[in-house]
Structure formats: structure tokens, C-alpha cells
Image (cartoon, helix red, strand yellow):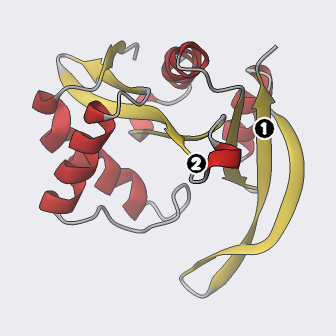
Amino acid sequence: MKANIAPLREEHFAELREVLDAVAREGRYLAFLEAPPVADAFAFYRSIIERDCPHFVALASERVVGWCDVLPTHGESRAHVGNLGIGLLPEFRGSGNGAALMSAAIDRAWEKGFTRIELTVRTDNVRAKRLYERLGFLVEGTHRRAFLVAGEYFDSFSMGLLRS
């Protein structure tokens, strides 16, 4: 199902946290296994808006069903680098929504002056890796035993995209 892409607004916070929690609880895609407490999540979302960070949501029937953001890294020597995060509810995957979210966030990141975007993806998340490669990301390294979920280790790839 196709979703509409929109910049993050405060009215999205509650639904965004619910989607974040649902994706986290799948245990396959994010570094955490549940969303942070409501107050912490909302404070984080507010800081994203205040800092004008690239953050977009996917909306289906006016409900949040996914997100993509590019957040700055810490340190002056890495101020040109953004870290991309993305998540979609399962029923909205494979319909072009991930590419649309990423394209919006990446375009905004370039406008903001980033010249490099990084992401991490588990090596068993083949579908996501293919999407990232289609959008120009290259594998730059492998991290062995990077994730530990339910007693099982998973490797991950570091991927990067340079502004052309």
C-alpha cells in the first residue's frame, strides 16, 4: 500500500512512537527492542524539529506507518556526516514507501549541507540492503557479532553514501 511522505510534526509523535515500538519489537531491524518511554521519545522528536534535522514520516489514511531520518553525528570533524534510520510497519514494506522516505530524507540532508550519510544494516536483512544499494549506498565494512538478540549474534554491514 502506498503512503504519503510528510515532514515530522508534533501531531505525529504518539503514532510515530507506536510504529517505532512495533518495528523494534520485531527484533530484526533496530538496535533496541522496544521504544523508549513516551516522555523520552517525545523529547527526542522535539529536538529533531528544533534542530531542523531531516525527518519524514509515511502516512496512510493520515496515520503514521513509518519514518526515515538523517541525524548528525557528534564532533566537529564529523559534522558533515549524517546517520540514516528508517522503519516501516510490515504491511507497508515492498511498495516503494522505503525508497520514498529515504529519498525525501536524503534530499533534505544534502540541502542541510551533509556530504556523507551512513547506516548500519544486519547482514540477514537482504531486502533492506538491496534498497540501500539501489539508492547508491555501498557496503564499506562488516561488523561481526554486532547485534545480540535472544541469545543469537548477528553481523551487520556499514554502508555509506557520498554526495556527488
Q: Quadrant of residue 136?
A: top right
**Residue 72, position as x, y percentages in the image:** 53, 41
Tell me the tag on residue 73.
Answer: 2
Packing grade of label 2 (10 A; few <14, some 14-19, many >=20) is: some
Q: Label 1, on which residue? A: 160
Q: Nearer the viewer, residue 31 or 117?
A: 117
Tags 2 and 1 touching, CB below 8 Å: no
**Mark found first going from the N terminus, 2 or 1:** 2
**Residue 99, position as x, y percentages in the image:** 58, 20
Packing grade of label 1 (10 A; few <14, some 14-19, many >=20) is: many
Q: Which secondary structure, mark 1? A: strand
Q: Is residue 145 above or below residue 135?
A: below
Q: Quadrant of residue 1?
A: top left
Q: Residue at x 27, y 50 (%)?
A: 44
The amino acid type of the residue labelled 2 equals Thr
Most distant residue in the bottom direction: 151
